Image (cartoon, rainbow, N blue to C red):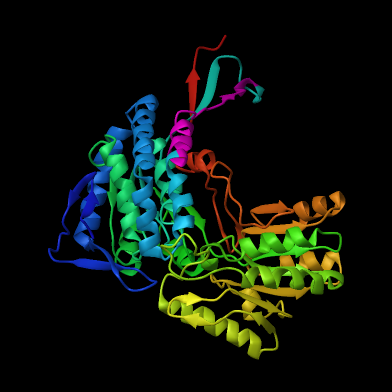
Amino acid sequence: MVSAELLIGSRWRASAKPGRTREVTSPFDGSAVGTVALAALDDVDTALAEAERGAAVWRRTPAHERMRILSRAAELADERSTGIAETISAESGKTITEASAEASRSGELIRLAAFEGTQLYGETLPLDANHGTGLDKVGFTMRQPCGVVVAVTPFNYPALLVLHKLAPALAAGNAVVLKPASSTPLTALALAECFVDAGLPEGVLSVLVGSGGALGDALVSDPRVRKISFTGSTTTGEHITRVAGVKKLSLELGASCPVVVLPDADIELAAGAVALGGYVNAGQVCISVQRVITHPDVTADFLDALVPKVEAIRTGDPSSPETAMGSLITAAEAERVERAIARAGADGARVLTGGERDGAVVSPAVVADVDPDSPFSQQELFGPAVAVSSAVDWESAIAQANGTAYGLGAGVFTSDVAGAVQAVREIDAGSVHINWTPLWRADLMPYGGLKGSGYGKEGPRAAVAEMTEAKTVVLHGRPW
């Protein structure tokens, strides 16, 4: 069993309040996974003070040297991938198959960010185009690190969502204070160890474990912090905007992602994609399929194709390679999802399969005839169930797709190029997938939402830009 200290200023330390620890347990069977030290408010102050000193050193480190250290961290992440996968699965309830896939992407994600950190181009300014300005001035822009970055990450992808913040911030020359999800801290600490062992200078990286309520406000409101990158609920994101003050923010928030199935769609392809996209990680994915909007002409065929595929998803012990879907993050979350499915049925929808709970495991559910205005469609479920509604025409389908407070991802199944073009232009989502579900992400692509799903972009190139600030430089010569 792992016993982990806090990482403060790139050094391992006990909590400022000795004896403050928490046992990390498996959500599947309650077995002990490890013990972590819990940060106190004094640790927040120490970490930010260290980050200020570390940022001053790291921003003056040449980009090629930062890339060398991050590349070594990527090598260590690759070498330790098996152990990291086991940790992911044990503390999150994710299947070992999914956890291994997540861990295997870690090294390459660090490399992508490391490269982008060396590509901070500016642009020249045509100052002589300004009336009254001659050829005696030269202007250009350049980018510099923000300074101290606070990153707050969720439980559902405890490796990738940590690295999508940590790696670009470090690559751009910032110091980082990371507050990982309290339920999955061991993965974050294992990845941080890769950076420390790779030679990251003192002060540059801290990982503080503890509740968001206890640590979050102290971190995001501190004036030493210039940039906040947060992934989590829309409610918490709104709170951060109120308490953060004048800082750069990137917020990846909630979602209720739609998939539209048009009459000319490949029904078998659509059903297979939804059976995957709605239930990976027990539906605990921001871009999971939550709503399917079908034309009445194909609704019955779609459900006939979908239900057997969903019923074939094997649940159980996450550590078994035979298990296709593990547990939710807690039994309380499983109870919440179970109630939401039951409530949808009581409100007139048809629960065609699934929805039963065993501890923290909820059997994959398909719920048909769902009112698009019901809570089951409008609110983020974050669980293994898909709501199916109908739309009589393309305009109604787009209205339903856009008919929630969210706008993270969407999918459309059609063989009509004109319909695909219309979908791309009219669906309000940060990513729109044609002939696939929104549950697809290449680590290099820009990623982020519209409306209540937040603002700012992740993906190494976009994130490195978000982790820097542009300044304008003007050289004044003598008038000719």
Q: Residue at x 61, y 57 (%)?
A: 439
Residue 127 is covered by the magenta coloring: yes
47 is higher (above) or lower (below) than 393 = above
List x then y, in percent, for residue 150: 37, 52
Quarter assignment of residue 77:
top left
Q: Which residues are magenta?
A: 108-128
Q: Residue furthest front?
A: 322
Quarter assignment of residue 276:
bottom right
List x then y, in percent, for residue 109: 47, 41
258 is higher (above) or lower (below) than 200 = below
List x then y, in percent, for residue 323: 49, 65
Q: Residue at x 56, y 82 (%)?
A: 340
Q: How many marks?
A: 0
In this rendered view, identify the residue nearer to me: 282 or 13: 282
477 is higher (above) or lower (below) than 37 = above
Image side of residue 400 versus residue 332, left or right:
right
Image side of residue 296 versus residue 232, left or right:
right
Q: Residue at x 55, y 65 (%)?
A: 254
